[in-house]
Amino acid sequence: GAGLVAGDRVLLSGPSSVDLAVAHVACLRSGLVVVPVNGGYTRNELAHIVADSRPSAALVDQKGWKEILVGLAPELRAAGTDVCWDDAPVPNLDSVGPADPALIGYTSGTTGAPKGAVLTQANLLAGAESVRQAWHWTAEDRLLLCLPLFHMHGLGVGLHGTLLTGGSAVLHQGFDQHRVLGDIGSHGCTMFFGVPTMYHHLVDDSEVGTLSSLRLCVSGSAPLSPLLHGRLRDRAGISVLERYGMTETVMLVSNPYEGERRAGSVGFPLPGVELRLAEGTGEIQVRGPNVFDGYWERPDADDQAFVDGPGGRWFRTGDLGSVDDDGYVSIVGRSKELIITGGFNVHPREVDDTLAAHPGVSEVAVAGVPSEEWGEDVVAWIVPTPGAPPPTAEVLRDFGRNHLAAHKLPRRVVVTGSLPRNALGKVLRHELREAVSDE
């Protein structure tokens, strides 16, 4: 009765819940295209996604979002995620094909506004099937999932893997280390998926040994440091399985379920994934049934993201890698300037533009610097406005709070007389990072 037809986009956002999962599956079964959105986004961030994806409807649970969305797009129909009914007719799956678009995931790049990666029904299935095989995932498994369902790690791996295998999941709305460690035993969980920041908090908990009752602990979305990997082994008796993926591809590479899980490495290509290193640059390029078809209405971005090679098109991940003599893949850097903090992507230019509007800032550039807790911290280098006191990190965070999600705000501010630039005037962010590393 909502008047939606196959191919219409539906914006979906809310704390993890059964209602949210049911709404997601209902959209997929109906041929609708899900647009998952971070619940921490501000009105400005929502405005871009709404304008770009042009959703026909939104199912959201965040306070005030329905009014914001209707204000951005008056024709948009907004409701809560509990809109599904038990007695509603079940969609005819014959009307949904493998090549049909299923999801548009907005991902930060190195230039311009976030782009929407279009994943098909077949892409999502291939992504879940690859980890089902690699991680020996069965209907007997119970996953403790506190990763958000707007993120590919939580949605494309956690939820889709659970549904594919017929297993079960315990959903947490956010991460609380004490609740995680308590629920592992009380709910009979067999697996836990997290980001390094979560493991950083778990490893120092007096009950961290509880993790040893799980058959599998997975880490992703940001690099897991060899130091933290070792501490988890020593304190909890576990060998965390680190893997590598992204919005455009779901999962790509994983350390082995059986065999050595090598610290500092992301392992081997998953079933169905082909991987190569570009000659000269070492950029990781991939192809396979899990790799997306292209960006939403951005043929210019597709031209930059794909390259012709043996067997067809290869997706350029923008990450630099190496492969050792045993075949283990390691991520050695990023050709993109993307910051990954706590498993979330931060586009530096977006933060630059926001902080530059502060009256005490003459020039600004942000970059990610290594952090044991967050993977990377967002650090802002500022040239103060002459005659004005330089704003502190707290001041800039307060200033940016109405424009940016919390994870994009700087944790630290470095005051400097000038920013390093090349001959064309481009800020050399790598020099900023190196200066902090040398301190």
Image (spheres, rainbow, N blue to C red):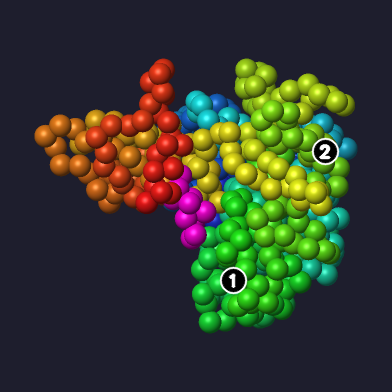
Q: Residue 31: give x, y in percent of width and height.
A: 75, 36
Task: Tell me the SS state at disc 1.
Answer: helix
Q: x%, y% of residue 289? A: 83, 37
Q: Give the dominant element type of the magenta stretch: helix, strand or loop.
A: strand
281 or 276, which lies in front? 281
Question: Nearest the camera: 27 or 325?
Answer: 325
Amino acid type of the residue that numbered disc 2 sits on in the rendered structure: Glu
**Mark sitting earlier along the chain (1/2):** 1
Name the residue rendered at 15%, 42% in the picture: 389
Would residue 94 be found to the left or right of residue 182 on screen?
A: right
In the rendered structure, does residue 370 fall within the stretch colored magenta?
Answer: yes
In the image, residue 181 lies at what x, y percent?
Answer: 59, 76
In the picture of the structure, the residue carrying the numbered disc 2 is 274
How many discs mark residues in the rendered view?
2
Identity of the residue drawn at 65% across and 55% down = 264
Q: Are marks 1 and 2 in contact (CB under 8 Å)?
A: no
Left or right? Give the position of 115 relative to 46.
Answer: right
The answer to whether one can see residue 342 in this image is no
Q: Amino acid at mark 1?
A: Arg
**Which residue is under mark 1?**
231
What is the x, y in percent for residue 116?
A: 61, 31
206 is higher (above) or lower (below) than 291: below
Q: Calculate the distance from the C-alpha at mark 1 to the C-alpha at mark 2.
A: 33 Å
Which residues fall within the magenta stretch?
A: 368-377
